Image: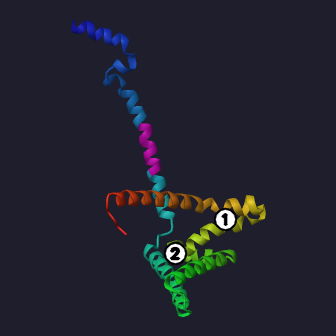
Amino acid sequence: KDQNSASATREVVPAFISCSITERLPSMKASFSRFGSACRLLQEYSAVVKRNSPKSKTYVNCLAAFCIGGGICAVGQGFFEAYNALGLNDKDAKTLTSVTLIFLGILLTFVGVYDKIAKHAGAGTLVPITGFANAMSSPAIEFKTEGLITGIGSKMFAIAGPVIVYGTFAATIYGLILWVLHMFGVTLF
């Protein structure tokens, strides 16, 4: 009975599946040898790339990002203190500080200075609000020759659009969570 069921299985199952591993071994060896040569080629290429690539200056780049990003934040704090000294309350001074930093980020992007600073500071110029202003304005400035709608209007949100959509979506979700918690008597704020 076992031999009959085995022969019936062999007839139903295609030959390439029912053949033993020893029958397939030569073709498998050929496949693995081709794969092995590709792996060796990839390893050789990686070694050449590593040898010819410039050495990373991670610590210097981190220090530059920290100093320039901190400098941008210090300028922002200076504006905040100046607006407070002019008699504005904290809320208005914070708002005006943000607007001023955004304006300066756009202005420096427009005259081509912000990109030169970012070249040396890296993430130090991306993290403060000036980095968002740069991300919003640089595509708009680049495509201003295409017109107000197809150039500036559409390109301005090329980078910032997903950020705005995600921010709005996240704020909605957080608001719903807080609302549900409040319904159960939990007040966080």
Q: Is residue 162 above or below residue 20?
A: below
Q: Which mark is residue 139?
A: 1
Mark linked to residue 187 = none
Q: Amino acid at mark 1?
A: Pro
- Amino acid type, label 2: Pro
Please tell me whether mark 2 sits on a helix, a strand or a loop. loop
In the rendered image, is residue 24 in sight? yes
At x 44% / y 72%, what residue is drawn?
A: 58
Q: Element type at marker 1?
A: helix
Q: Which residue is mark 2?
A: 128
**Point 37% across, 12% down: residue:** 12
State the predominant SS element of the stretch in magenta: helix
Q: Is residue 131 or residue 177 the one in the foreground?
A: 177
Nearest to the observer: residue 143 or residue 122:
143
The magenta-colored residue range is 33-42
Give how far across and how far down residue 104 sits, in percent: 62, 80
Q: Position of residue 59 (x, y in %)?
A: 43, 76
Q: In the rendered view, tell whether residue 32 sits above or below residue 139.
A: above
Cα distance between the residues tagged 2 and 1: 19 Å
Seen in the image, is 50 located left or right of residue 184? right
Q: Locate the C terminus and report the quarter of the image it occupies.
A: bottom left
Disc 2 to disc 1: CB gap under 8 Å: no
| 51 vs 10: above or below | below
Q: Position of residue 153 (x, y in %)?
A: 70, 62
